[in-house]
Amino acid sequence: MSTPTLNHVFTLDVELAPPVLIGPTPHGMRRVIPITGGRFHGPAGSGTILPGGADWNLVRADGITHLWARYTIVTDDNVPIMVTNEGWGTQDDATMDRIFAGGGADVDRWYCSTNPRFEVADQEWNWLNHSVFVGHLLPPSRGDRVRITVYTDAPVPTPSTPRKADH
């Protein structure tokens, strides 16, 4: 068996509102980070990130952050796609506070990977429903936006090539 090759799908530039601090819960420090919009672009296509989603972010006592975000993107050809993005990072509570205060992340100590999942009805984008994806959340330099690069080991249809329901 050969080693899988990851193919770039697109990059999400997500705009954020200030977090709503729920506070220390039995599970850890909980904050809800509203998603206010943004854009995505890449080999698979491009479009808009709609406002209205959020990341229900939890920093555990061991300094590991659990991300669970749900939001909607719309392609430039007007196809709505639901996104659920869950993952883990090494951002402790002090790091999260520094990011939201505008101080940015420590690039040398940053790790944050996710498993984006997509739901779409449009047949040309159906391949998103049954492919496996890896997201890499890049170290933010400011608290009001994040960038996530999304990859898959499946072939990535492009706007200039025919899309198929199965690959």
Image (spheres, rainbow, N blue to C red):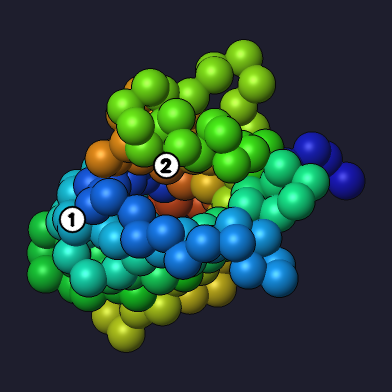
Residue closest to the far left: 77
Give residue 55's position: percent from left, percent from top: 43, 61
Residue picked out by circle 2: 148
Q: Can residue 93 be seen in this view?
A: yes
Residue 138 at what x, y percent from top left? 47, 31
Residue 85 visible in the displayed image: no
Vertically, is 41 above or below 114?
above
Q: List the residue tagged with mark 1.
A: 37
**Amino acid residing under circle 2:** Ile
* Residue drawn at 79 percent across, 38 percent down: 3
Towards the viewer: 8 or 94: 94
Amino acid type assigned to the residue bearing label 1 in the image: Gly
Give the label, 2 or 1, closer to the camera. 1
User: For the point 64% across and 39% down, which residue is it?
Assistant: 92
x, y percent for residue 87: 61, 55
Q: What element carries label 1?
A: strand
Circle 1 Cα neighbour tier, 10 Å, few/some/many (<14 / 14–19 / ≥20): many
Cβ atoms under marks 2 and 1 closer than 8 Å: no
- Which is more N-terminal, label 1 or label 2? 1
Most extreme residue toward the top is 108
Instruction: Report the residue that reaches farthest toward the front.
Output: 24
Q: Which residue is drawn at 22% across and 70% down?
A: 52
| Label 2 Cα neighbours within 10 Å, binned few <14 / some 14-19 / many ≥20 | many
Give the total of numbered labels. 2
